[in-house]
Image (tube, rainbow, N blue to C red):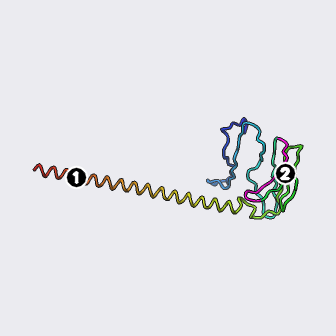
Amino acid sequence: MKKLKMDDSGYYWCAVKKKDYLNVDEGSRLYLSVTAGTPGLWIDQQEVTGVEGGHVSVQCYYNELYDSKSWCRAGGSCVEVSSGKSGRSEIKDVSSKKVFNVTMRELNREDTGCPSDIKIVLMALGILLLAVAVAMVTWRLWKRHGQEVFEQQRATTESEVLKAEISSCS
């Protein structure tokens, strides 16, 4: 993509399909963030896939010299450049290129996605949203039913009044 504008920000997909198939077989999304100026910190890859037992590397770019650079897992611990290594994560700063490289080794399935405490919060939010949606649908149906009953009663009352007027005229 060339000549990016801020309006170009959003989710995009890379997709592949097998020959003679109608549906997409596999896809991967990314979020493109177009900023007015150079951000203070950015990465090229928003999603990285690794093989269990293998390793992955991520490059974190920065536009100024910062005192402290870290690699952190949401809800977990951080590794700073000064320490260089913590557990299976290693971080190296190449200040001449304004990038620090992070390598995670001996990957396992627990390294995937969000930490479990965030998953629990997201699950609770999902259940709450479902409960609110069910309550709203139930309320709307109840309201519609009440309106229908009211209309029916009004029509019956009007019919009875009309009959009473006709019988009083005869």
Disc 2 marks which amino acid?
Asn
Does the magenta segment cover residue 68? yes
Element type where label 2 sits in the image: strand
Q: Quadrant of residue 40?
A: top right
* Dot label at residue 37: none
Residue at 79 percent across and 62 percent down: it is: 107
User: Can you give x and y, in whole percent of width and height, for residue 128 in the image?
Assistant: 56, 59
State the image quarter where residue 55 is shown. bottom right
Residue under label 2 = 101
Query: Would you say 121 lies left or right of 43 here?
Result: left
Residue 18 seen from this side: no
* Residue lying at 82% horizontally and 41% vertically, measured from the top left: 63
Residue 76 placed where, x, y %? 75, 59
| Span of residues in magenta | 64-76
**Rendered image: mark on residue 159:** 1
Q: Amino acid at mark 1?
A: Ser
Front residue (pair 83, 88): 83
- SS state under label 1: helix
For the image, the number of numbered tags is: 2
Mark 2 Cα shell of 10 Å, populated few (<14), some (14-19), many (≥20): some
Task: Kindly identify the residue that appears in the image at 67 percent across and 48 percent down.
Answer: 13
Task: Say if residue 168 shows up in the picture.
Answer: yes
Please indicate whether residue 162 sits to the left or right of residue 137 in the image.
left
Task: Answer with mark 1 or mark 2, whichever residue precedes in sequence.
Answer: 2
